[in-house]
Amino acid sequence: MVRAGHLPREKELCSEESFYFHLLDDTPPEDAIPLAFPELDQQLQPLPPCHDSLESMQVFKQHCQIAEEYNEVKKEIALLEERKKELIAKLDQAEREKVDAAQLAREFEALMEENRTLKLAQSQCVEQLEKLRIQYQKRQGSS
């Protein structure tokens, strides 16, 4: 008994079999439908519908919508992965800059301490030089 809008089971099997044979032997039949979503894996491709079956057409349409959503999610994941890499690179750069800044701060403190020490040594040398001049002038004046 054939229901309205449905093919006999044998015809459905024939079209399914030809499709599955196509998947197995990689030889496209004359009426092969091109891949609806070329970027989708073969096993995720929507199967061609039986055009005489409303249910088959609805399932095909639903599968196409799901495949589109899957592609969108995949693209979004790829974009998020790329953004994640960018953020990790920025974080690494910030960490290096933080380490560099800390190193520069330590170097600055060391140089400031060295500067204070050198200024003190210079002032002591100036005092000593002044004392030597005074002594030299006293010797010159007494001779």
Image (tube, rainbow, N blue to C red):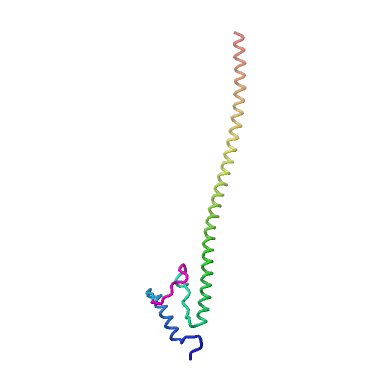
Residue 85 in percent (x, y) is at 52, 56
**Quadrant assignment for the C terminus:** top right
Residue 88 in percent (x, y) is at 54, 54
Tell me where residue 140 sits by quadrant: top right
- Magenta segment includes 39: yes
Q: Which residues are magenta?
A: 29-40
Dominant secondary structure of the residues highlighted in magenta in the image = loop
Q: Residue at x 58, y 35 (%)?
A: 111
- Magenta segment includes 4: no
Query: In this figure, what is the number of numbered marks?
Result: 0
Give the left or right position of residue 102, taking residue 22 as reference: right
Residue sitting nearer the eye, 133 or 41: 41
Q: Is residue 107 above or below residue 87?
A: above
Residue sitting nearer the eye, 52 or 104: 52
Q: Is residue 94 above or below residue 64?
A: above
Q: Residue at x 59, y 14 (%)?
A: 136
Give the left or right position of residue 62, taking residue 34 as reference: right
Q: Is residue 3 above or below residue 73?
A: below
Q: Residue at x 56, y 46 (%)?
A: 97
Give the left or right position of residue 132, taking residue 5 as reference: right
Residue 16 in percent (x, y) is at 43, 80
Q: Residue furthest bottom?
A: 1
Q: Is residue 100 above or below residue 129?
A: below
Residue sitting nearer the eye, 91 or 52: 52
